[in-house]
Amino acid sequence: SMGGWTQFGVDSATAARLLSVQQVKIDGLHGFLGTRILDPRIVAENLKKMVDEADLMEKKTARKFSFVDAGGGFGVPLYPGESRLDMETLGTLLKPIFSAYLKDHPWCEKLAVESGRFLTAEAGVMVARVLDVKKVHGRKYVLLDGGINSIGGRDAFWGAKHPPIAMVGKRRGEDIYTICGPLCTPMDRLAANALLPNPRAGDLIKFYLAGAYCPTASPGRFLSRGFPAEIIYKNGSLELSGGIWGDNGG
């Protein structure tokens, strides 16, 4: 949840007061109520709340918004048992909501939504190399050369939930492992109780659905580990991207 009693944005009363100050040029309204939502009905309900709020603010303050960002929350399934967001149903639900708002507010030049991770999550894979495999207090661990410094922006489950994972290497049976990165903190845990082919040093492990909120939301400077290198598939070939980090790691 991004709405309610949080530090984000302003409440309705404050917004109305700000909008009443005519010396300030305000073109529109932006709201956001949730993230990673997979139920089209909830997404539609949230977006309707925002266009309703825009309508209410215009009536309270005599403003005319040329731009309304109704927010987003479009999710992608990351974990077992989750289903894809039904875009056909979502479109059916949103069409009358948006059409009615635009009809009643012909001065609105753009009514937008935020697609967020929905556009990019499935486009990225994080690949890390196995440095070591060890056993501590009866639990098997895989240690990688990349951890939350590379893919830490996914969630705060400490690896209890994890997206699809695959190993590149010779298959030698399989077992249950906890997969960790190279940082000296127990938070650097990418997957707990993951069933994997038995890995060895040098094997590669791929973490799918890593195209959103991964390096950009990761503590890459922690212990000076650095951010991962970015390989871009473009025009039929692979390119090493300079990225935005300034010090791409290995």
Image: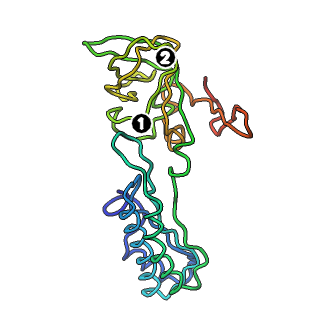
Q: Position of residue 74 (x, y in %)?
A: 45, 56
Q: Name the quarter where the C terminus is drawn.
A: top right
Q: Amino acid at mark 1?
A: Pro
Are dots 2 and 1 in contact, CB under 8 Å? no
Is 106 on the left or on the right of 15, as rendered?
Answer: right
Distance from label 2 to label 1 (Cα)?
A: 18 Å
Q: Nearer the viewer, residue 81 or 64?
A: 81
Sequence order check, earlier mark of 2 and 1: 2
Q: Position of residue 57 (x, y in %)?
A: 44, 81
**Label 2 belongs to which residue?**
130
**Label 1 belongs to which residue?**
163
Q: Position of residue 2 (x, y in %)?
A: 38, 58
**Compared to 46, does 108 lie above or below?**
below
At x 40%, y 63%, the residue is: 43
Q: Name the quarter where the N terminus is drawn.
A: bottom left
At x 39%, y 67%, the residue is: 46
Dot 1 falls on a residue whose secondary structure is: loop
Residue 188's tag is none
